[in-house]
Image: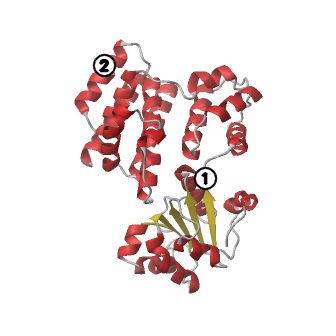
């Protein structure tokens, strides 16, 4: 089943009961991941539940095709319907998934994430032609979608935003849904308990803030696992009067770029770092970091940075200590994968 654009949002919130499998594909890795989680959570609220959620990759299914049927037919020890999430799928998995859709087993919902697929893709065709499957294209947000995203996140946070601030954000946010969400979340965190509407000045102070070389150096050293360079960069940041929160925000932005690139590469797509805003002098280093990090590990790194920012802003722990600890944890994780 091929969904029309007007049907997608309602389907993501509540998939039709006859649907046994959903394919998400396109150029926006962040939107693919976001919608995959929303669809899966329509069946299992807690996606960390090991009894009701199985996570596989396209490569694992290619090597062991029986895994799909085994996981789909498994019965949760705690009861309830299960979800099988498959990331990094491609046309090499098409025959297996087409066979499953022709003769499904169990009652699990299969959620499949892929990269960009051509209109004649065999994987895409298998889902579009099946009455018990759905295929959703996920592409860069247009202005209307960005306006909706901004206003929804602000409303859910219990805040208000000035019209000119919405317009500025829509013009300055990136085209990747995950990156846009991250920037809006930082803006809401910056606003804190301030009850006044988010203004244009608030947006300019937080979103798309150009970092100094010292801040970039600290972020780059952390994700490279270079302890000496990280220590040196943090020392220079402190001497220059840069705040720990500013360091964490630049590290978050760098991690988001890596996450987007890693997700795209895992889906079999070519990655051009310069299109993600990576300076040409950093290109080779960025490529090396992509070999060290998977998209799942990068998601955890981003969680560490977000938690550190919250700690720095809302607890008695010194901000510099929270920042340093987070970056060192990321550097250690990078070293392990070398």
Residue name at image x 70 percent, y 23 percent: 199
Left/right placement of residue 180 relative to residue 154 reads left
Tag of residue 10: none
Tag of residue 235: 2
> How many neighbours does mark 1 have within 10 angstroms: few (below 14), some (14-19), or many (20 or more)?
some
Of residues 161 and 7, the one nearer the viewer is: 7
- Where's residue 97, x and y in %? 51, 77
Asked if marks 2 and 1 touch (Cβ < 8 Å), the reply is no
Q: State which tag comes first along the sequence, 2 or 1.
A: 1
Left/right placement of residue 72 relative to residue 45 reads left
- Where's residue 67, x and y in %? 42, 77
Q: Could you tell me which secondary element the residue under label 1 belongs to?
A: loop
> How many neighbours does mark 2 have within 10 angstroms: few (below 14), some (14-19), or many (20 or more)?
some
- Where's residue 12, x and y in %? 67, 60
Q: Is residue 211 above or below residue 30?
A: above
- Where's residue 306, x and y in %? 48, 36
Residue name at image x 37 percent, y 25 percent: 321
Residue name at image x 39 percent, y 24 percent: 215
Residue 70: tell me if it is visible.
yes
Alpha carbons under labels 2 and 1: distance apart: 41 Å
Q: Is residue 107 above or below residue 315?
A: below
Mark 1, residue position: 139
Total numbered circles: 2
Quadrant housing residue 335 = top left
Of residues 126 and 236, the one nearer the viewer is: 126
Quadrant housing residue 269 = bottom left
């Amino acid at each position: 089943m091929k969904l029309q654009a007007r049907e997608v949002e309602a389907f993501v919130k509540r998939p039709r009961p006859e649907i046994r499998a959903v394919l998400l594909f396109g150029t926006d890795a962040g939107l693919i991941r976001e919608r995959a989680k929303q669809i899966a959570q329509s069946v299992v609220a807690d996606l960390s539940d090991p009894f009701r959620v199985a996570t596989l990759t396209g490569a694992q299914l290619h090597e062991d095709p029986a895994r799909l049927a085994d996981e789909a037919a498994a019965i949760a020890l705690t009861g309830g319907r299960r979800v099988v999430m498959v990331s990094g799928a491609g046309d090499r998995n098409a025959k297996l998934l087409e066979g499953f859709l022709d003769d499904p087993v169990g009652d699990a919902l299969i959620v499949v994430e892929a990269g960009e697929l051509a209109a004649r893709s065999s994987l895409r065709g298998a889902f579009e032609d099946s009455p018990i499957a759905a295929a959703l294209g996920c592409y860069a947000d247009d202005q209307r979608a960005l306006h909706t995203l901004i206003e929804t996140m602000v409303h859910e946070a219990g805040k208000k935003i000035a019209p000119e601030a919405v317009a500025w954000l829509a013009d300055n946010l990136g085209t990747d849904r995950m990156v846009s969400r991250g920037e809006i979340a930082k803006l809401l965190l910056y606003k804190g308990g301030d009850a006044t509407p988010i203004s244009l000045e608030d947006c300019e102070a937080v979103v798309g803030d150009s970092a100094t070389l010292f801040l970039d150096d600290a972020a780059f050293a952390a994700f490279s696992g270079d302890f000496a360079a990280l220590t040196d960069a943090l020392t220079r940041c402190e001497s220059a009067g840069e705040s720990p929160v500013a360091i964490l925000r630049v590290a978050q932005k760098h991690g988001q770029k890596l996450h987007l690139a890693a997700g795209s590469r895992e889906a079999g797509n070519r990655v051009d770092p310069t299109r993600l805003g990576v300076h040409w002098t950093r290109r080779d280093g960025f490529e090396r970091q992509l070999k060290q990090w998977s998209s799942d590990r990068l998601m955890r790194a981003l969680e560490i940075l977000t938690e550190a920012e919250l700690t720095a802003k809302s607890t008695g722990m010194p901000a510099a200590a929270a920042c340093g600890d987070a970056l060192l944890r990321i550097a250690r994780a990078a070293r392990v994968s070398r």
